[in-house]
Amino acid sequence: MSPRTARFALDPAFAVGEVDPRLFGSFVEHLGRCVYTGIYEPGHPGADAEGLRQDVLDLVRELGTTAIRYPGGNFVSGYKWEDSVGPRDERPRRLDLAWRSTETNRFGLSEYIDFLRKVGGEPLLAVNLGTRGVQEALELQEYANHPGGTALSDLRVSHGDKDPFGIRLWCLGNEVDGDWQTGHKTAEEYGRLAAETARAMRQQDWREDLKLVACGSSGQGMDTFAAWESTVLQHTYDLVDYISLHAYYEEHDGDRDSFLASAVDMESFIENVVATCDHVGARLKSKKRINLSFDEWNVWYQKRPNPHPVEDWQEAPRILEDVYSVTDAVVFGSLLIALLRHADRVTVACLAQLVNVIAPIMTEPGGPAWRQTTFYPFAQASRYGRGRVLQVNVDSPTYETKAFGEVPLLHATAVVDDETGAVTVFAVNRSRTEALPLEVGLLGLAVGEVVEHSVLADDDPEAVNTADSPDRVTPHTVDGTGIEDGTLRATLEPLSWNVIRLA
Ligand code: AHR
């Protein structure tokens, strides 16, 4: 028995919860080149009749993203939805204060719905509670969802959208706790506004599947963290379904070991928000449970200088175009594991963002589209991470980090598909230098063979995919992973993301 072996046991009787498909959501914001020359580029040789890039549509389908949040982000706090509908040539050009860009509104609400229909995504629309309020949210809801026979629903029909958009999931503003937000508010101010907006939206649409997300903190590090959630939920508890969480991770001062353990922070963030929600629920003597919408998460190098020249009020500037390495993909995979490990309470999550802007898919205007390293963990988790998450308590060798103290080298979760009996283990080895032997006890699971052990790892942890080398980094399969006497045995390469599929 090697002392460096990591182990855990799986038992279908001990589950965390069912994975909500909305856990594999993503995010399209009017920011940089996410929309323009990202998903929408009418002059592109591969664009369809509506100007959507078909190479990007193919990659979005392959990624397997579900709910797609729109139109922001910070952008939504100055958003006038009326600008983004109707004949394209009559839509106004506006200043976008959030990203100091010019918004042409060539792509708007109807184009977003067309995009969703083509990729099989679900709308997750944010309303502007920065500079606007209850009335505008109601008008947007009427335009989008009412079948017809009223001024705004008939306006939609006159714009060519006969069928209502059927939006069931809405964000009540964005990061209103942050002083960078246009229309930033205190928790009291926002809590009241969110409650009244939610109440009015429910007056207009009282069906049970209308789901509303109140803004939580923009990060666990905010001075107002937890107090914000508590105050906001005190006002909105009976009126909303989710509270939001946002978190971005990057390497600080060359401290890679802490960066590799970023999911420790993500898991504590989730658990602290769950505790806060349940505390408010207890205070209100409520039986209702508020779930979590982790509607912005990713690796984001906020401190890196932008290599591209950008002018104020430029259209679709090259901003936030992070290029992700193998190391980033391993951290990213670990963040996915953290979300799955809390699937009982995190029932919506959005990878921020989808194309070009801190994204798994990159494009060149007039040129190709390609997959970043982070594309692979997301696509695999979305494809194989459906079913019931099983409890995983690891017994693992550890390593020391500056930010989080002693951290297990193994980070793992497992999902069982109860219909087929298939089990998928998702595991990250955080060691930069050593392979990690893994043993998994399979108690009461009807699995006898390893279908595939797929690995994302590389001799060069800085390796990236680019337009010129789009397939420099891809997952590979490894041999030697097997099941014997009810135990799965594998070796996890140093600094690796692993998907082990059992049938
Ligand atoms: O995703 C980029 C930005 O990060 C979003 O616009 C904002 O909500 C967050 O601060």
Image (cartoon, rainbow, N blue to C red):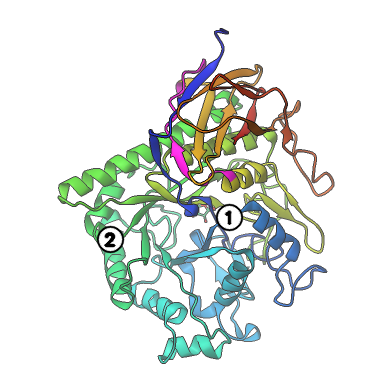
- Which numbered circle lies on residue 189? 2
Q: Between marks 2 and 1, how big is the CA–CA gap? A: 34 Å
Quick check: 149 left or right of 457? Answer: left
The number of discs equals 2
Residue at the image position 51 percent from the left and 85 percent from the top: 156
Quarter of the N terminus within the rendering: top right
Q: Is residue 298 magenta?
A: no
- The magenta span reads 384-405
Q: Nearer the viewer, residue 476 or 192?
A: 476
Closer to us: 316 or 374: 374
Residue 450, image x, y percentages? 64, 31
Callout 1: SS: loop
> Is ligand 1 closer than 8 angstroms to the Cβ of mark 2?
no
Position in image of residue 111 (x %, y %) = 61, 74
Judged from the image, the secondary structure of the residue bearing numbered disc 2 is: helix
Q: Amino acid at mark 1?
A: Thr
At label 1, counting other C-alpha atoms closer than 10 Å, the crowd grade (few under 14, some 14-19, many 20 or more) is: many
Q: Which mark is residue 65?
A: 1
> Where 397 falls versus 282 (above or below)?
above
Residue 456's place in the image compared with 365, above or below, is above
Q: Position of residue 122 (x, y in %)?
A: 52, 64
On the image, which quarter does residue 103 sit in? bottom right
Sequence-earlier tag: 2 or 1: 1
Is residue 48 visible in the rendered image? The answer is: yes
The structure residue drawn at horizontal position 59% and vertical position 64%, both measured from the top left corner, is 120
Question: Is the residue under label 1 in contact with that under label 2 (CB below 8 Å)?
Answer: no
